[in-house]
Amino acid sequence: QVQLVESGGGLVQAGGSLRLSCVASASIGGINPMAWYRQAPGKERELVAVITSRGSTNYADYADSVKGRFTISRDNAKNTVYLQMNSLKPEDTAVYYCNTPGRGAFSWGQGTQVTVSS
């Protein structure tokens, strides 16, 4: 079973940036897609960004709420998925997780807390 470890969260002012990392314990080169999720207090976990590798090309898609501000990327050689978050807003405050969507999902990691102050 692949283990996922998220990091890079923290406290940031509105308008600031953070870069999250998700390191997998095994190769993710053949795992598509990979995704970032978030869960705010009292809310359900939601899909934020998805990335699919096809050969040397990566394809990304985003929730409308983060489109234009967040960028997902992956480094298969490092078994790592990244989430660059710019122009952060207080409503981005949540615990962020990575995983692969659907029935092939791994056990959830501990996530990384992102708190955006106004």
Image: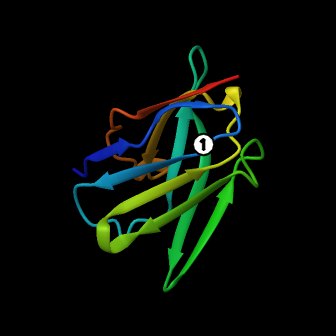
Q: Residue at x 25, y 52 (%)?
A: 2
Q: Hey, what amino acid is under mark 1?
A: Leu
Number of numbered labels in the structure image: 1
- Secondary structure under badge 1? strand
Q: Residue at x 67, y 39 (%)?
A: 88
Tell me if residue 17 comes above or below residue 39 in the rendering.
Answer: below
Spot the residue most to the top: 42
Q: Residue at x 45, y 53 (%)?
A: 100
How crowded is the residue under tag 1: few (<14 C-alpha within 10 Å), some, or many (20+)? some
Spot the residue most to the bottom: 56
The residue tagged 1 is: 47
Quarter assignment of residue 37 = top right
Q: Position of residue 70 (x, y in %)?
A: 65, 52
Tell me if residue 27 comes above or below residue 7 in the rendering.
Answer: below
Q: How is the image coloured?
A: rainbow
Q: Is residue 55 left or right of residue 15?
A: left
Q: Which quarter shows the C terminus?
A: top right
Q: Nearer the viewer, residue 10 or 40?
A: 10
Tell me if residue 102 comes above or below residue 88 in the rendering.
Answer: below
Q: Residue at x 68, y 53 (%)?
A: 62
Q: Is residue 116 left or right of residue 4?
A: right
Q: Position of residue 19 (x, y in %)?
A: 50, 50
Q: Position of residue 59 (x, y in %)?
A: 61, 71
Q: Nearer the viewer, residue 115 or 96?
A: 115
